[in-house]
Image (cartoon, grey):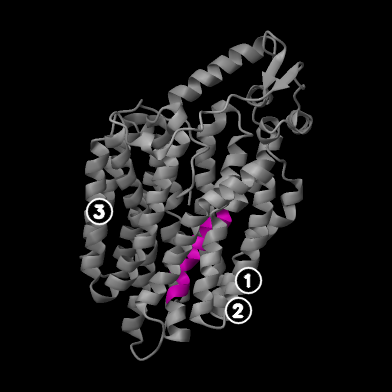
Amino acid sequence: MYYLNEPTLPSTENYAQREAHASNLELKTVSINPDDTYTVQQAINAFGFGWFHVKLSLLVGLCWMADSMEMAILSIIGPALFCEWNVTKFQQASVTTIVFLGMMISSTFWTQLSNRYGRKSALTLFGVLLVLYSILSSVAPSYAWLLTLRGLVGFTIGCVPQSVTLYAEFLPTKHKGKCVVLMDCFWALGACFEVVLALVIYPYFGWRGLLGLSATPLLIFTLLSPWLSESARYHSNNGRNDKALKVLEQIAQNNKRHMLIGRLIADQEPNSTESFRSLLSPSLYRTTLLLWFIWLASAFCYYGLVLVTTELLVARNKERYPNECVTFMTSDFMDLLWITLSEFPGILLTIKVIKLFGKRKTIVLQYLVLVFCTFVLTTVSSRFSTSVTLFIARGAISGIFQAIYVYTPEIYPAALRSIGVSGCSVLARLGAMLTPFVAQVLMETSRVQAVSIYGFVGFLAAIACAFLPRESVGYH
């Protein structure tokens, strides 16, 4: 999800406002710098958000949908594996954990590959490999083969942040914050689409058919990737201004704007010599440690709720049919769909609340809602009450991710934004790797203990949020 990716879209609101204001003053008058030069970002600011960006948003959105679907399917195939191969809960949890492990160890590989050969080339390879590994997973002959292939799926998904990098490098400054919300909506759409696909496919073709067809968005993206434009900033920074100009001319033509007059020069790039050690400097270490825990807790709780939902639905079926190996029924998928749909109001409501109270207070409030929902889950037993509680909890944790994804780069100096959220992303993946052993392994032993752990972690995260530095109120 929007979830565990490296930062590129969000920037600090004050910084974005200053940059956009300066660019507008500059470009509204002469469209070029006084010395007849302009940068890629200045050209993109002048062209505005238009048809080119609509097409790009849809293509990048397919990547986010595919990523979300691969995450959502992890909660569905676990019970099915028990019925087919009689795997233990620990083995089911390992299938989920290995995907996030693959994502964690592949991040640097995909970053270096895209920096050397371009974002488009890396994303095209990513699309081909993910489709291949997804299809192979659907015909895995044994648990060991499935575990290996899902690890390769996770390794490939580690490329998804490069789609965000490409997207951000094409966005006008003043639209970057709003496009974070757009990508979050694609994530939620992918999760819902996976449940709808499961509702249609699973009863007839089982988990194998579902795994294979879940690669559909990535297959579409791969087929359309020849029409994907390489980043003009990537070309410019590598001394290929002729290719960068062609891309800029395409943007201007698609957006029905005039091409700038002057000489294209490279954008000023942030100092790349900064290291993770800088995040733990005397002025930042407290903020960094708090954010690391909050990101870990957010991923731990988000994916935990996804897996807990499945466990509760399947447990209800086992009570009804104690002598059969049952997984999902049609009614379960309908409940799962309604619960997943909560991500949309969760994201949109978060935006409204941020405008009133700011991000820090919004995150604290949402974590308290999550804690309350976990307490309710330990006491209710009816299908309706459980579904409503999970709906509210899922919406709250989705909103938390929305808020911290925008808040985090805002709190770091410009030179540390990218590495700052990269560090948070690593901790988030660690949280996602740990959560299956609570939501699946411990849940089998004690529902109260498992759900209580999420409430306890959420409460600690709320306290941590309360000690974060203040930020400006509003959402731009």
The residue at 65%/43% (across/down) is 116
CB of mark 2 within 8 Å of CB of mark 1? Answer: yes
The answer to whether one can see residue 196 in this image is no
Say which of 449 and 159 sits in front. 159
Name the residue at 60% across, 68% down.
134
Q: Is residue 176 left or right of residue 302?
A: right
Determine whether 100 is above or below 443 in the image: above
**Magenta highlight: main SS:** helix
Camera-nearest residue between 158 and 356: 158
* Above/below status of 384 relative to 68: below
Quarter of the figure with residue 393: bottom left
Q: Secondary structure at mark 2?
A: loop
- In reply to whether residue 403 is colored magenta, the answer given is no
According to the picture, the residue beneath numbered tag 2 turns out to be 139
Three-letter amino acid code at the position of disc 2: Val
| Residue 195 point in image, percent of width and height | 51, 65
Residue 342, horizontal then vertical, whole percent: 42, 53
Closer to the camera in the image, 192 or 284: 284
Question: Label 3 near label 1: C-beta < 8 Å?
Answer: no
The residue at 69%/53% (across/down) is 124
In the rendering, which numbered label is found on residue 442? Answer: none
**Could you say which disc has been placed on residue 135 in the image?**
1
Which residues make up the magenta segment?
65-78
Q: Quadrant of residue 91?
A: bottom left
